[in-house]
Image: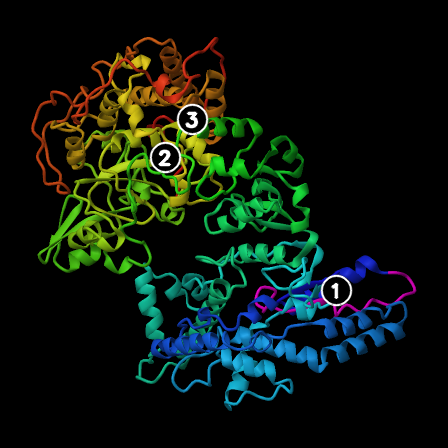
Amino acid sequence: MHGVDINPLAAELAKVSLWLESLTPGEPLAYLDDRIKTGNALLGASPAVLERGIPDGAFEKLEGDQQPVVTKLRQQNDQERKGAEQLPFAERVMRTSTAMVRAEAEKVAKIGDHSLAEVRQHARAHRQFEQRPELRHLKRVADVWCASFLWPKHKGAPTAITSNVLRAVEKDEEDSPLADEGAEAMLRDIVRRNQFFHWHLEFPRVFRVEESEGDDVNPETGWQGGFDAVLGNPPWERVKIQKKEWFAARDEKIAAAATASIRDRMIEKLATSVDEEGRPNEGDRQLYAEYQSDQRESKGQVTMYRKSGLFPKTGFGDVNTYAVFAEKARQLIGPEGMAGLVLPTGIATDKTTAPFFSDLVETRQMVAVLDFENEEKLFPAVHHSYRYCLFTVAGRDRAAETSEVRLAFRARRPDQVDARAFVLDADGFARINPNTGTAPVCESPEHLRLLEGVQERLPVLRRHVGGGPADPWKLGKTPFLTMFHMASASGHFSSEETLLESGGTRRGAIFEGGGERYLPLYEGKFLHHYDSRFSTFEGATEAQLRMNTLPRLDAQQHRDPSALPFPRHWVAESEVEARLAEDKSRLREAWTHGWMMGWRDVCRAVDERTVIASVMPRTAVGHKFPVILLREGAELLLANLSTFVLDFAARQKYAGASLAYFLFEQLPVLPPDAYDFSAPWTRGAPLADWIRPRVLELTYTSYEMTLWAQHLGDDGPPFVWDQMRRFLMRAELDAAYFHLYGIERADVDLVLDSFRAFKNKQPAVFQDTKAEIVRVYEAMAEGRPFTHPSLTPPPAQGPRHPPGTSPLTRVIPVGGPPKNPAAPAAKKKRRGKSAPDQLGGGLFGLDEVEGGDIQLDILNLFGEDEQV
């Protein structure tokens, strides 16, 4: 039994726990200091990285460093490494053999613990072993390698550690102090603060470094052997310091700053803070020094994770400790060993951990991912909505036993796992998430069956690997845009108070003043399905703001075509236009339309709806509503993204709270060519001409969306917000896409029943929407032209408002309905070939109609809990 923890108290408690568990009457407590140790289990050198010398990644600018010095040291280190490549092999490789150390450790381990004398002998022998010159030398070399990443790099700093310095330390078996007078003290200080832990030196009996070319050598670490079993519940936290959290316990005013840019300015003022009499404020200045020190340490550790080679599969992006702990566990197990960890489910579903997870699957080392929702508080201190999993990995020699991965998701108790479990092999992961190879999160084998059928029939939005259409929608190399990051771009934001104080005047949703127009900053909360005016900051209470929810515009406000969401920030129009201009460095063309389309990034699979796409006017928008730069067919993709069958597929791929690009790209969507074909219910017209009028009337209910309507071929004023007409049109669209996705009648129930939140929160509304969606689906399934009897007049011919204008568009629509609002494009219509012929069979051939509960949220008019 071995263990390590960075907290000395935790290590001591582990010993106490083991003593209590193994207590034998009449015998003393065992000596455990050679097996339970204190140190940073993640930060330590391995034989493999030592043999490669100091990497260029050790020379990254941290707080207090000077870039010219950093650059010069990186170049110097590069030259030293290249020079070493010309040396004889025996001289250029770090000698990391632990054969002698292991032999001495074996002697110590053979000392028993059955008498007090043996315990004392064991302790004495271990202390002597720790002082052996060969062990101390190996640790010193490893410490020097680690310290190079955190070494100060500025004028006047002690001589930095480069590959030549490391080589000199390795050759000096006497362990003389570093030549620079301050360097030795700096080295000891860095080692003390970071508690580097070199596994092959701390546990030489477990990790052997003796035969570099042996069949059992781990190529990632350079050692042989490993543990038979590794168990852990590592911390789930970001390594990078979060400024708001860091100051929360030290300076509440800084933590409570309105924006990130204001917080940054307040932090910088601490460095030169003075009191009322102009004397230096030592408290503030000391706080700033502590912050700078912690920032440097944090960024240095992040650099080690990313650039050292210690974590080639998880050392990416905004590193979270659980991911690197998972990779470390894999490195620590022997060829026949196994590791079991309690981790956030993102280890199997997130993009940053996708290389690690897919590698485990491909090498057949991934055994099981058993996911739990914490609704029954198995972990009392963890938020109830947080998802975690039991993550099991096998050693590389067990590959023959693990050709398939056992998966189960959304269990709340261990006894629910078996009923939800299913298996997938490497090909199965690739079929469902071809770009990343990450795991689906289906809550039952039946959900997996349905998802696999959808993935087989439809392409994903964008495919980065072979096996299907790469980009059926022709989105190009840079299809998405995040305009304004709510933290890093907050310096561009102005509040209403600021604009009024500077002499600005408000006109509708915009401000004008100083020769500049300021446009409202939309946030994802403002937008919903077919609704660019879902919620507003106007009238928001403190309680709502704390919960990150906003008041919704009710039906009466929606019937006012001039009503717009009231924002909390405005952005200069020139800055907005700069974000939408051509960006040659990213191969992105200028966005020239007066509208934008995107989706809410913040959402969860357990919310009433997950994928929430919408169109909005051309204005500023926060990064949590990414914009899709699709110029042709946007209304068709919008209709697809707003359906329940698409939402169901998304929920089977998604376990977090952010619908990131990599997830969005892997959604199965109808290809654009399919819209050129007719379906039995379209009276011979192409699907596009049937869908477009419905999307037009659903989205065009206010003056600021005039340019969007013109893009769809409509020159009339906005449509009146009619809740019943909207209900019926959305029912038609959802029913149509069920058919187009090849969903059989019984499986329609399976899809809709998975939207439990809507059914549980609003059962009466659920029953009404259920009846309508099924009625339309069944009517369409009869194979005859279908027109909803209650949609009179037809879609895109409903009641309209008088002509008007919006300050966001400054366009006055011409009165009267368009002659042909359904067909703005000049594409040649193809007839005589139906959607089933194009998309595959099984769409409409139903033998019988089955009843069942259906969970739908066709309309957002019914009210739902805000998704933050």
Q: Which secondary structure, mark 3? A: helix
Which numbered marker is on residue 232? none
Comparing marks 2 and 1, which lies closer to the viewer? Answer: 2
Q: Is residue 411 visible?
A: no
Mark number displayed over residue 469: 2
Decide whether residue 42 is among the magenta residues.
yes
C-alpha gap between disc 2 and disc 1 = 58 Å
Camera sees residue 178: yes
Three-letter code, disc 3: Arg
Look at the numbered disc 1 and give the secondary structure of its residue: helix
Q: Which residue is mark 1?
A: 15
Residue 23 x/y as whole percent: 85, 60
Quarter of the image with the C terminus is top left
Q: Nearer the viewer, residue 92 or 583?
A: 92
Label 2 – label 3 distance at C-alpha = 12 Å
Magenta range: 24-46
Seen in the picture, residue 621 relative to 282 is either above or below; the reply is above
Please rate how many residues cluster around mark 1, counting C-alpha atoms within 10 Å: few if below 14, some from 14 to 19, many from 20. many
